[in-house]
Structure formats: C-alpha cells, structure tokens
Amino acid sequence: MSTSSFESLNFDEFSLENPVNSSAGRRSRLVYLSRDSPHFAKVEDLFNKGWRHGKKARPHVQGIFKILWPDSGLEPYLQYREQVQARIRARNEAGNEKFLFHGTNRACLLGESSRNILLCGLKECYLCSILRASFDVKKCGSKNAFKRFGHGIYTSACSSKADDYSCNLSQDACLRTLLVNRVVVGRPYKRYRNAPDLVKPPDGFDSVSSSLFDSHLLTSSQVTGEIGWDLNHEETVCYTNDAVRPAYLIVYGHKPKDSPKPGFKTLMSMLFKTPLVS
C-alpha cells in the first residue's frame, strides 16, 4: 500500500487509527454517540425517514454507536470503492456510496446500554460476527432460505423493512438493533420480479437496487429491487464482500418502565412474609 493510500486510510471517518476516534487515549471498535452529536442526528433522521410501514409504530432511537475498523478490515472496502468510482465516475466521488440498513440475529446484549460494547463469541449471534469481520456472501441464506435476488448481501433504505429481520435470541434483551452500512452501490441493475438464481448482477452493473433511491444514494456491484409486482419495499443486493462495511449500530425500542420501589411496610412484609397492620 502506498504512503498516500495509507494516509487516506487512517483519516477515513471510520478508521480505528483516526485520531478523532480516540477517547482519552483509548480506542474501541464501538463508540457511543451523545445525542448532541451531529452524527447521532444524521443517523436518527435516516432511521425515522426510512420507517415506511404504516402499520408498524415507529420506535424510539435509544442509542447509536459508531463502528470503527482496523486497517485490515477497512482497506479492502476503500480499495473496492476507489475501483468502482474510477469506472462509474459518481458525483459523490465515492463510488456512489450510501448508508443502508440491515437487520440480523443478536444473541447477546450488545448495545443495551452505553457500556455494553464488547462483542460476544456466540455462534448464533450474527450481529457480533458481522461486526467482527463484516459481511460474508458465503453465509447468505443462513437465516432466511428465500433469497429474492439470489446469493448476496441484502440491505435497504427502508429501516422498517430491515426491522423485519432483526431478532433478539436473548430473553434478557429489551431493545432491538439495526446496522447502518456503508454500501458501494455503483451502477445498479433494477428489477420488478424475483430472481432467486442470481449470483451476480448482469455485465456492466455492480448491484441490484431500488427506484426509490435518490440518484445520490446508488452505487455498483449490487442488484436493485424496483418497487413493483414482487416487491413493495426497496432492497439493494451486493455480491462481493468488499462492497459493504457496517458504519453504525442503532439501538431502538421502548425501555421497560422501572418498577416502583416498595415502601417500608411492603418491604418488611416481603422480608418476614407477614402482613403489617396499619
């Protein structure tokens, strides 16, 4: 890697080596964002505007974590984005990179509070697996057998659609989680019908993606599902691992209300299992 590319890598917004991402000399893969952070406002707005299922009440965003990557995880993504940009010359000069949602299984309590930032090692926790090593096309379909646009990595601008795939396996979890991902959409191929046998987009395209995207939301190595006969909410599918990197973890839902603390008489009654006379 050249010196110039090394410098751009370290100054990427999501680089673990970027000095702005260190806190008091400490570095963590997950950084909790305060509510007054402009990044918090941007991601929360993306989540709220993407909640398009009218019959699903939009939940409250409880917390947002920024996801940082070491050089080994970030460099392949940035190199792929540069290659796509050189080919399509996107206006945003970033290979038509967009922020899109993905929901998956969480078996631990990652994100339940600002202190829960350690990744677990449970095999059934797909969330921590993705955060540890990003997405793997080979694992496509391990959760859902039906693949509308074939064997790829599925994301959506519709947060309420991604929510359909978010699942808590721990009974102690009170909140839900979604990943917000950097996705190099490139030149998307649009479809109205299911195409479950796809393993890559047609020649000259980079992805399969949806028509509801603004022009600045689209990138390459994906397939775009056009809203139509077989699809009522957009999807974007990538067929290469280096086209996607998780950027933020959104924690949302309604926290259970704290039970009122028992009064003195109630507490004594509980301790001695004897009702107290008023």
Image (cartoon, rainbow, N blue to C red):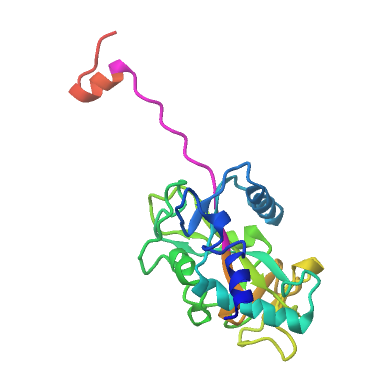
Residue 83's place in the image compared with 244, above or below, is below
93 in magenta: no
- The magenta stretch is 247-265
Q: Residue furthest top?
A: 278
User: Residue 230 appears in which quarter of the rendering?
Assistant: bottom right
Image location (x, y in percent) of residue 72: 50, 74
Residue at 34%, 23% (x, y): give it: 262
In the figure, is residue 64 to the left or right of 24? right
**Closer-to-camera residue (199/206):** 206
263 in magenta: yes
Location of the C terminus (image quadrant):
top left
In the figure, is residue 239 to the left or right of 23? right
**Closer-to-camera residue (63/89):** 89
Residue 173's place in the image compared with 217, above or below, is above
Residue at 65%, 65% (x, y): give it: 100
Q: Residue furthest left?
A: 272
| Residue 70 visible to the viewer | yes
Image location (x, y in percent) of residue 27: 46, 56
Location of the N terminus (image quadrant):
bottom right
Numbered marks: total: 0
Image location (x, y in percent) of residue 25: 46, 52
Residue at 39%, 55% (x, y): give it: 170
Residue at 64%, 59% (x, y): give it: 159
| Residue 53 visible to the viewer | no
**Closer-to-camera residue (111/51):** 111
**Closer-to-camera residue (176/205):** 205
User: Residue 34 appears in which quarter of the rendering?
Assistant: top right
Image location (x, y in percent) of residue 41: 67, 47
Q: Residue furthest bottom?
A: 203
